[in-house]
Every structure is written in structure tokens, then in C-alpha cells.
Image (cartoon, helix red, strand yellow):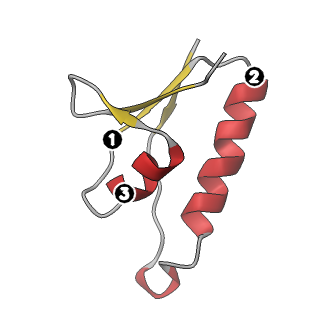
Amino acid sequence: MRGYVYNVATRPPHRRRGYSRACMTALLAWFDEAGVATVDLRASTDGEPLYRGLGFRPTSQPTLRYTFPR
């Protein structure tokens, strides 16, 4: 099973406070509990470092992918 994150956005005055990281960490835990094997998303250049830091890796498409270690 595959998950997809469609849109993550934080208003500019609230950026760099860990909100997106906290949401994505909780979402990845939820996907993991649901048995999802991989999660795809498309990241902006501003957001890409966050997602790479969470374990997402590039694919041959303009998509980053997270694969749960099993």
C-alpha cells in the first residue's frame, strides 16, 4: 500500500518552529500503523530539506519517497 502527502503549508509568520516536522512525524507514524509501505510527496525547494531530514529520498520522478524500514 502507498500513501501520498498532497500539500503541507505553514503561514510565513509561523515557519521555522517545528510545526511541519511535528505534523509530518505524526502522519508518518499513522501511515506506518496503517501498514503503508511507502509515502510519496512533491516538495518545494524550501520544504525539501525538511523531508529529506525525515528520511524521504528522491525518485526518478519529481517526487520524494519515504520507505518504512521493515
Whole-percent x and y of residue 58? 30, 33
Whole-percent x and y of residue 8? 47, 55
Please report contact status of discs 2 and 3: CB closer than 8 Å, yes or no: no
Between the residue at mark 2 and the residue at mark 3, the CA separation in whole angstroms equals 26 Å
Whole-percent x and y of residue 6? 44, 41
Residue at the spot of label 3: 49
Q: Quadrant of the C terminus?
A: top right
Amino acid found under the numbered disc labelled 1: Arg
Residue at the spot of label 2: 34
Residue 42: give its label: 1
Q: From this view, report whether residue 53 is shown above or below residue 11.
A: above
Q: Image quadrant of residue 47?
A: bottom left
Between the residue at mark 1 and the residue at mark 3, the CA separation in whole angstroms equals 12 Å
Please report contact status of discs 1 and 2: CB closer than 8 Å, yes or no: no
Between the residue at mark 1 and the residue at mark 2, the CA separation in whole angstroms equals 21 Å
Q: Which of marks 2 and 3 is nearer the N terminus?
A: 2
Which element carries disc 2, helix, strand or loop? loop
